[in-house]
Image (tube, rainbow, N blue to C red):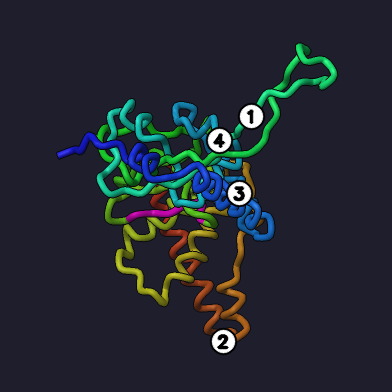
């Protein structure tokens, strides 16, 4: 049963003006620390995936990055969630974004009745809640302006494709149990990579942990091949796993590895382009 208590109001009642300022300072420090890490460009790229119907799409870039740091792609105030028929779960904790604080100051101090302008004097902390901490009605999903080809192939194998902001450093992931491919970028090659993983699992459902790097090499090869077929070549793929093997194994062992990757990649491509579809 849903509680009618507003968690944001509860926070308000227990928090002094001074602690709001401290909270705002803490959030600003998070932003400052990002400028000395390699995580910032990754978060900036993810912040570009915006669904216009989400309030966060109108937030400042800094607030969107603070949201991504919490591991969510959608955050709203308590009443904003109620407006879309979702409710904050009891016991959920808010995180904070920054709201600017302006005061009016005269343009010319020698003219008491002259024109005034808004001057930024600081920030206030605003509590918001993650989508993952709410429950209720389903929300419309983000759709890219230029969707990748082969979405019908994913559907043919029972896989749904969603676009969400994922955690830093992750642009795509496949949930085999729920049969969902989740993408955090409209880049076609990321979808191709995850599609390759999904189709690989269709004929090798139990990939062992020590085979995962080999599966990554397979997915990279399939994605690079598809990118060229659709005239969007991407040469940023890493062959670290095979290079590592080449430095620590015999040529015969590395050759066998490459042959396995090529064989499985061909099987995946044959699933995407059946002989009947290719006109062979």
Dot 2, how many residues are within 10 Å of its Cα: few (below 14), some (14-19), or many (20+)? few
Q: CA distance from mark 4 to mark 3?
A: 11 Å
Among numbered discs 3 and 1, the one appearing first in the sequence: 3
- In the displayed structure, 165 sits above or below 175; it is above
Among numbered discs 4 and 3, the one appearing first in the sequence: 3
Q: CA distance from mark 3 to mark 1?
A: 17 Å
Q: Is residue 20 magenta?
A: no
- In the displayed structure, 277 sits above or below 107; it is below
Among numbered discs 2 and 4, the one appearing first in the sequence: 4
Under tag 4, what secondary structure? Answer: strand
Q: Provide the residue span drawn in magenta.
A: 170-175
The residue to which callout 2 is attached is: 249
Can you give x and y, in whole percent of width and height, for residue 44 in the image? 61, 46
Under tag 2, what secondary structure? Answer: loop
Residue at 48 percent across and 71 percent down: it is: 213
Q: Nearer the viewer, mark 1 or mark 2?
A: 1
Quadrant hosting residue 136: top left
Among numbered discs 3 and 2, the one appearing first in the sequence: 3
Can you give x and y, in whole percent of width and height, for residue 55 in the image? 47, 30
Q: Nearer the viewer, mark 4 or mark 1?
A: 1
In the picture as drawn, the residue positioned furthest to the right comes out as 110
Magenta region, main secondary structure: strand
Residue at 41 percent across and 59 percent down: it is: 267
* Disc number for residue 102: 1
Can you give x and y, in whole percent of width and height, for residue 165 in the image? 48, 45
The residue to which callout 3 is attached is: 28
The residue to which callout 4 is attached is: 99
Quadrant hosting residue 127: top left
Residue at 60 percent across and 45 percent down: it is: 45
């Amino acid at each position: 049963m849903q509680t009618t208590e507003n968690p944001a109001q509860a926070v308000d009642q227990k928090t002094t003006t001074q602690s709001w300022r401290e909270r705002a300072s803490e959030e600003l420090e998070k932003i400052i620390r990002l400028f000395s890490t390699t995580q910032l460009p990754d978060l900036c790229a993810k912040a570009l995936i915006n669904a216009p119907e989400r309030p966060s799409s109108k937030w400042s870039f800094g607030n969107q990055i603070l949201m991504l740091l919490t591991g969510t792609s959608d955050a709203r105030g308590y009443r904003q969630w109620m407006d879309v028929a979702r409710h904050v779960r009891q016991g959920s904790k808010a995180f904070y974004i920054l709201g600017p604080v302006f005061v009016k100051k005269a343009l010319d101090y020698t003219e008491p009745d002259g024109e005034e302008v808004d001057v930024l004097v600081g920030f206030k902390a605003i509590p918001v809640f993650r989508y993952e901490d709410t429950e209720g009605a389903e929300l419309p999903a983000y759709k890219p302006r230029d969707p990748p080809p082969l979405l019908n192939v994913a559907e043919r194998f029972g896989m749904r494709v969603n676009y969400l902001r994922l955690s830093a450093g992750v642009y795509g992931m496949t949930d085999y149990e729920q049969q969902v491919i989740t993408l955090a970028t409209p880049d076609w090659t990321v979808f191709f990579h995850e599609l390759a993983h999904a189709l690989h699992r269709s004929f090798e459902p139990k990939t062992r942990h020590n085979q995962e790097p080999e599966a990554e090499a397979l997915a990279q090869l399939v994605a690079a091949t598809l990118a060229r077929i659709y005239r969007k070549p991407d040469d940023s793929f890493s062959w670290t796993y095979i290079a590592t093997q080449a430095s620590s194994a015999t040529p015969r062992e590395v050759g066998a590895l490459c042959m396995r990757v090529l064989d499985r990649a061909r099987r995946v491509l044959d699933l995407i382009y059946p002989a009947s579809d290719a006109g062979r």
